[in-house]
Image (cartoon, helix red, strand yellow):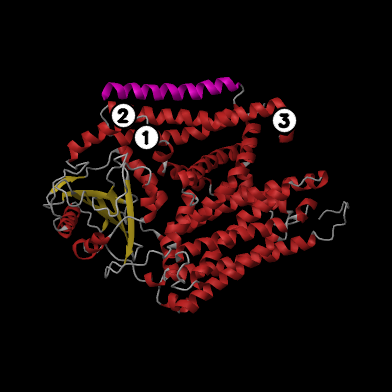
Amino acid sequence: MRTNAFNRGEHVALAARILLAVLGGYACCWGVVALFAAATFALGAEFHDGETLGSILALLLYPAAFLWAFAARRLWLAGTVLVGSGALMAGTASLIQSVLT
Amino acid sequence: MFQSFRHAATWVHTWFGLVLGFVLVVVFFFGSLSVFDREIDRWAIPESRFEPQPMPSFDKVLRPVFDTMQPMKESVDAMRGKVDGPMPERFDTVRSWSAYTTHRDPVLLLWASYEVPGAQDPHDRVWGNRTIDPRSGKVFPDDQLKIGSQFFYPLHYGLTLEWQDLGAWIVGFAGLVMLVALISGVVMHRKLFREYFTFRPTRNIQRSVLDLHNMTGVLALPFHFFFAFTGLLIFAGHYFPVTHTQLEPLHELHEKIEEQQTGLPQDRAGVPAPLASVDAMVAEARRRWTAKGMAGEVGLVSANHVGDVNGYVSVWRAGTDRIANVSDGIHFKASTGEVLYEEPPLTAVGSVGNFLIGLHLQHFRHWLLRWFYVLGGLMGTVCLATGLIFFVEKRKKQHAKAGGQSRRVVDALAVSTITGMLVATMSILVANRLLPEALPSGWPPRGDMERYVFWGGWALAMIHAFVRSAPVAMDRLNPAWHEQCWAVAIMAVAAMLLNWITTGDHLLRTIGAGYWPVAGVDLSLLVTAGLAVLSARRLGRKALAAMPVPRGGTAHA
């Protein structure tokens, strides 16, 4: 693809996708780690096992989310899914925490 | 905006690969060297050239050294501003003393951490370390730089940019981009297996560079993916500090429960108590390992809350014959020596995590695999380097026509990163042998001088690359490529010779004595010199062949 063929509007869209890939992907992965750590603890498993398992999954998920942010046809959909799921998972983790502590 | 997934993948591969490729070359190259970090340490510190030693007696050898230790100035300085009230002159509340050794360590590194009175975050510690000869307890000077484990290794995972852990974050992002680039690279090249067997070294530079990029990328694909992934996993707690921010309360709850289950106190009681014989505890730990059918050496020993009734000592088995660094820890009450807690078998998740991380760090004994790590790491370096060169070559012609200068910059950066990195590496080795043992007073410590030479050598290589970059704008080869290859060859041979002159350890002697740490580094220097000469001659010919292009002519070589 000829990259210099981007016009002004596309440059903005590209910047948005880069931000989404990096930060949206991060938010989603943060949620995964938080949810796994809190949920495994609530289920009585070893706390750091949940963190390790969440980290392994998050680090496999991150590159996929990263690429999806560029490949997705609808940017808003990818944004909603990545940031939304991250917030939902992190929120659930905090909820579990507030019940337990 | 992209016509297809493949277009998106190609764009991501090209541009993120370009920007982070420079970082990844450094990470892969110094990671490859770190596989033999201890051996490079032996080369750099001649006094430490003896056989690996087991963990020495704690009571007779380690205790007297620990007793005299204090935190490093850097660590105390880093605490300033995080303390209410004045910073104490001396630190006497020991949080932990620890010593870690592997089957490749002649010298022993000791760590001590101290509680800081008035610290705003009570978890904060100040740290000190010391390197000793475990046979005698003799302390090595602090200004000696272990070039392998204290410089190349930190470069590998954090670029030695310690401010705000910036280096570790850059490397982490680069690691993510490596994973992304591997996936997008596979998506780009659907004809994966044909490219596996395609290498046309005699065709034009652009073609052969791409072939080499694909070959090294595909051939070692599982290796690259595994190491980028596990490298990120090692630092996962750093990159996603969930349990120390959002889930801090849950983490504290977990620590309280763990304290009850294991009987290992989190804090001091404030009641003084002596430290019983640690050697007796080590003997008991070894007896228990033998009873389990897994007799072994001590890898890690640590004393916690020293001098307090809540103190405990942990003894861990070395992972020489295991993937995990250490295992089967047994904890003792420091004041009496009774067993408090024996680590249970790992959970399934714990085993998987230990396996992934242990395989990356490779503290176990397997010399063939160790060499495969170097090979894989260097293939990764070549893959990244050729990717950068391909980027330039592909665009050089069209930019030469359009009169753009940006490829000059990218090409000069590629020279700086690839051959410049080798120049810097050779500079620090040469400096290590050339600097006098004792520097004049007022000079920086010797180890710091070596670092400065490394960065100075790299900066010079960069300046050279930019100064010589004019031909790139005319679709020709930057002569800095082959000139720096010559510099690398000369310095590699010089480092080998200087080792001979300053220590008397020439290759015949080290090979004859079977002292492979030093012989291996010397031999690697010679191989590096040989490869650099070959590359220099080839690149020199190419640069010459492209020379007589008339201005504005169409006869491109």
Asked which secondary structure carries label 1, the reply is helix
Badges 1 and 2: C-beta atoms under 8 Å apart? yes
Q: Residue A53's mark?
A: 1
Number of residues whose C-alpha sits closer than 10 Å to that of mark 2, classed few (under 14), some (14–19) or many (20 or more): some
The residue type indicated by label 1 comes to Leu
> Which mark lies nearer to you, 1 or 3?
3
> Which mark lies nearer to you, 3 or 2?
3
Q: Which chain does the numbered disc 1 sit on?
A: A
Tell me which residue sits at (28%, 21%) in the image: A99
Tell me which residue sits at (63%, 67%) in the image: B487
The answer to whether residue B121 shows anywhere in this view is yes
The residue type indicated by label 3 comes to Phe
The residue type indicated by label 2 comes to Thr
Q: Which residues are magenta?
A: A74-101
Q: Position of residue B115 (x, y in %)?
A: 27, 47
Q: Say if B267 sits above or below A44 in the image.
A: below
Q: What whole-number distance in Å separates the C-alpha atoms at marks 1 and 2?
A: 10 Å
Which part of the image, by quadrant, shows the N terminus of chain B? top right
The tag earlier along the polypeptide, 3 or 2, is 3
Q: Position of residue B517 (x, y in %)?
A: 42, 68
| Farthest-out residue, front | B85
Residue on which disc 3 sits:
A6
Q: Is residue A77 magenta?
A: yes
Tell me which residue sits at (40%, 44%) in the image: B234
Q: Which chain does the numbered disc 3 sit on?
A: A
Q: Which chain does the numbered disc 2 sit on?
A: A
Q: Say if B370 sits above or below B194 in the image.
A: below
Residue on which disc 2 sits:
A40
